[in-house]
Amino acid sequence: MPRATQLADCCQPYVDGLINAPTAEHLMRSRYTAYALGRADYVLATWAPQTRPASLAIDPPDTPHAVRWLDLVVHSHTQLTPTQAQVMFTARYREGGRGYRLKEHSRFLLIDDKWYYLDGDVDFTA
């Protein structure tokens, strides 16, 4: 989980809804943070309406069986058009005592001056 200083400097203002993420990369980092904090409300609110699930269950981080997010590496952020971007990243996590890597090529849309996660191509490895 992000440390308090990193959280305040990076993503807390976005996750708390104080300001909008200025780029797709900022949005992706804040969504990772929201997953780590168990903030399904933010993850859903930043999901593009056309691909947003009706609900999302994320266990709070203090739950014994919760996924433990360990770190995030952003490989690239590409602005394709003024309203479309992509971010490639790897996130490491632990679940049930095992370590995993999630690699994703995510797509984002800018709608009414706000970035949203559209979808992504995901690869999970142990």
Image: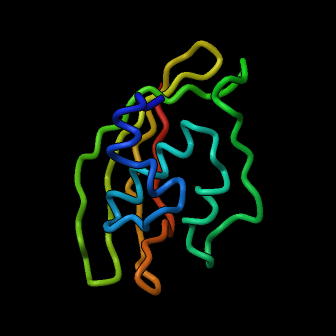
Residue located at (31% from left, 53% from top): 88
At 62% from the left edge and 77% from the top edge, which residue is drawn? 49
In-image side of 42 versus 1 (left or right): right
55 left or right, relative to 93 = right
Where is residue 8? Give x, y as percent: 39, 42
> On screen, 35 above or below 51?
above
Residue at x 43% of width, y 68% of height: 20
Q: Position of residue 110 (x, y in %)?
A: 41, 79
Colour scheme of the picture: rainbow
Closer to us: 11 or 83:
11
Which sits in the foreground, 2 or 87?
Answer: 2
Rendered residue at 33%/65% (across/down): 86
Placement of 69 over or under 98, stated as above or below: below
Q: Quadrant of residue 109?
A: bottom left
Residue 48 vertical position relative to residue 81 in the rendered view, above or below: above
Q: Is residue 41 left or right of residue 101?
A: right
Residue 2 rendering spot, x and y as whole percentages:
43, 32
